[in-house]
Amino acid sequence: MTGPPELRDLLGDDLPDEERARLERVHELLVAAGPPPELPPSLAEAPDRGSRPPSWLPRRRLGAALGLAAAIALLAFFGGYAVGHQSSGNGFDTDRSVVLGSTGGMLAKVRFGERDANGNRPMLVNVQGLPRARDGNYYVLFMTKRGKPIVTCGTFNVHDEGRTTLRFTVAYDLERFDGLLLAEYRHSDHKDYPLLKGKLA
């Protein structure tokens, strides 16, 4: 007897990493919820066509009552789903976090999630106080060793208000690095200019 198909087989390889991670979290919630309860024997057979609704409920109100009951059940389901996501920080369980700061009001907070079965690790990045990078410039987040940028986690830009929240996925072993560096890549000379640093505990 074969088990259910793997989620990866059903989704294929065409989805972006962020969308795949979101669907995997929803899949895990559904698996954790388990199968629905067994159908009670009283509902195993359809009622007789001649059966009537309860006499205390006027026929014209029966449809409205059934619709209301369905709406309440739907709200309860999605309400529980939303509470589950809020309790884990917008669907993000933090394994460790790093704060990158400097003078001038620029700040970045990076949260790492647990590695999944494939060895990928989600990252949630919140930045504030960054000026909008223009003229082909953008920001780059690096993993560092002894203060030197080694590998890239991702690139991004911000609007004029200088804050944004991003999700990256990396497959790096965090134990191989000792910090994070946020730099601005400048198109004019093709160089990275360090802005914020933080130690990886």
Image (tube, helix red, strand yellow):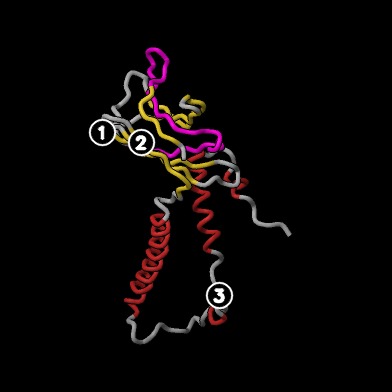
Task: Name the mark nearer the viewer: 2 or 3.
Answer: 2
Q: Position of residue 181 (x, y in %)?
A: 42, 29
Q: Is residue 27 magenta?
A: no
Rendered image quadrant of residue 180: top left
Q: List the residue tagged with mark 1.
A: 161
Instruction: Name the secondary structure under disc 3.
Output: loop
Magenta residues (range) = 164-193
Disc 2 residue type?
Answer: Ala
Q: Earlier in the sequence, mark 2 or mark 1?
A: 2
At 42% from the left and 84% from the top, the residue drawn is: 52
Q: Earlier in the sequence, mark 3 or mark 1?
A: 3
Q: Measure the alpha-carbon separation of dots 3 and 1.
A: 54 Å
Tell me if residue 173 comes above or below residue 48 in the rendering: above
Instruction: Name the secondary structure under disc 2.
Output: strand
Q: Is residue 173 magenta?
A: yes
Tell me if residue 58 comes above or below residue 145 in the rendering: below
